[in-house]
Every structure is written in C-alpha cells, then in structure tokens.
Amino acid sequence: MSASSDSLAQVGSEVSTCRACPRLVDWREEVAAVKRKAFADQTYWGRGVPGFGDPEAKLLVLGLAPAAHGANRTGRMFTGDRSGDFLYAALHRAGLANQATSVARDDGLELDRVWITSPVKCAPPKNKPTAAERDTCAPYLHRELELLEPRVILCLGRFAWDGALIFLGRPSPKPVFGHGAVADVTVQGRPDLTLVGSYHVSQQNTFTGRLTEDMFDRALGTALELAYPAQP
C-alpha cells in the first residue's frame, strides 16, 4: 500500500468517527436505527462515509452527501441506491469500474483512475446539508484533494461545484456552474485544477430526463480526457 493510500485511509477513519455536526449525527443515527422497511434486516453503517476509489486517481468525482438509505446504510459512496446505479454504470461504460453495479462494500467493485467523495460526509435530512455543515466538513475534503492532487474534478451539481471552489480559495470571478461547464482554475500556491460540471445523478434528475445517460457520458468523457490526455 502506498503512503498516499495510507494517508487517505487515515482521513477515511477520521471521517467515520466524526461527530462535529449535531444535526447530521442525530439524523444519520436515527435513520440507522429506524431503517427503511426494505432493509429492516440489515445493519446500517450510520456514520460518516469515507471517499472511495483509486488512490492514484487524477480524476475526482465530487457529489453532495451520502444518501440516508444508500451510503449511510452501506458505508460506501453512491452504494445501494438509484443514484449509484446510474453513476457506476457510467463509470463501467467508461472503463473506470470493473463492474456496473454497487450494492455493498464487499461486492468486489474496484475503481481505476477515479476517486469518489463528497463535500459533506454524513447523510443530511431531506438530502439538504447546510453551508455551515459543508464548511465544518471542508477540512476532510481539503486533505483528500491535497493527497490525491487531481487534475480534474467532475462536480455533480452546484453544491459540489461550490465546495470545490472553496478548496480553491473562492476564486474571483467565480466560474459559473452548468451541465457540461468547464473551468480552468489557477490559484497561487495550488496546482492548476479543471472543474467539469454535471447535473447530479439523483433519481429526481435521471428519472425526469433532466440528466440522461448520454448527457452524463459526455460530461464524464470530457473530464476523463482532461485528466488523462492522450499521449502524442
């Protein structure tokens, strides 16, 4: 195991035991105790959810926060819900995942060249973390980004886009979020980073057609090409 993955594992361990945000701690633990009827026989993770993927990745996928009955149940990002079904199928089509499904931490899923994380590490009520909770959680994301040194961040939604810009020192003028948006950000003292925007892979977006497989594949393809440019 590389020194980088050792450090990322340490961040993940701290995330899983963090209790800094009382509202989020209360909610994640209430959900884990009450459970959804379909998962009544399962033991919920009910903690902060670490990032997941290739510790050498130069492409980072940044979401919003763990889903109450998805990652908060399974303990792995975008695992066990419809958003994950959509995301991991796309990663598999792009050659970044060894399988198209993600149902449990021990299901054999492996990622190549991509790391998945979120600005907020605990499931929030109504899937709506506050800006203050994002700011409290920001040091974990900052440490992940500093360890990984990605070239490209694929931001799933405006919340993720804004979270990445906080890491980059809130550059001015602020790059505008949009699906397919590409912004090169240079901040003194940090490596250059490119942000690529995508609508979030939420069930609300994918079921209504606001985000289609083709739309997401194109955004992901752009991010992948920028992170790993073809050799001349």
Image: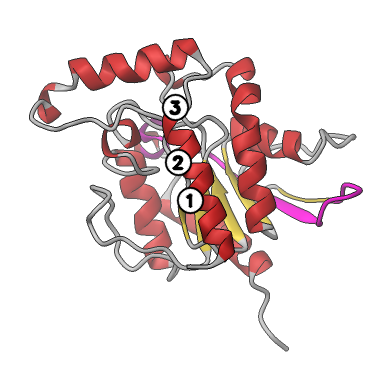
Q: According to the image, label 2 marks what residue?
A: 13
Question: Where is residue 49 shown, x and y percent of the image?
Answer: 42, 36
Q: Residue at x 63, y 57 (%)?
A: 148
Asked if residue 144 is positioned above or below residue 158 in the image, the reply reads: below
Disc 3 is placed on an element classified as loop
Residue 217 percent across, percent down from the top left: 49, 58
Q: Are discs 1 and 2 less than 8 Å apart at CB?
A: yes
Q: Which residues are magenta?
A: 186-206
The crowd level at tag 2 (other Cα within 10 Å; few <14, some 14-19, many 20+) is some
Confirm whether residue 99 shows in the render.
Answer: yes
Q: Is residue 143 magenta?
A: no
Residue at (49, 19) in percent of width and height: 128
In the image, residue 210 sits, relative to residue 221, either above or below, namely above
Residue nearer the viewer, 99 or 74: 74
Pinpoint residue 12: horizontal percent, then vertical percent: 47, 43
N-term mark: 2 or 3? 2
Please tell me whether mark 2 or mark 3 is closer to you in this view: 2
Taking 84 as reference, is 193 left or right? right
Q: Nearer the viewer, residue 6 or 91?
A: 6
The disc label shown at residue 122, or none: 3
**What type is the residue that disc 3 sits on?**
Cys
The residue at which mark 1 appears reads as: 9
Say whether residue 178 is visible: no
Amino acid on which disc 2 is placed: Ser
Write down the quadrant of residue 156 in the picture: top right
Residue type (three-letter) at the residue carrying disc 1: Ala
Between marks 1 and 2, how big is the CA–CA gap? 6 Å
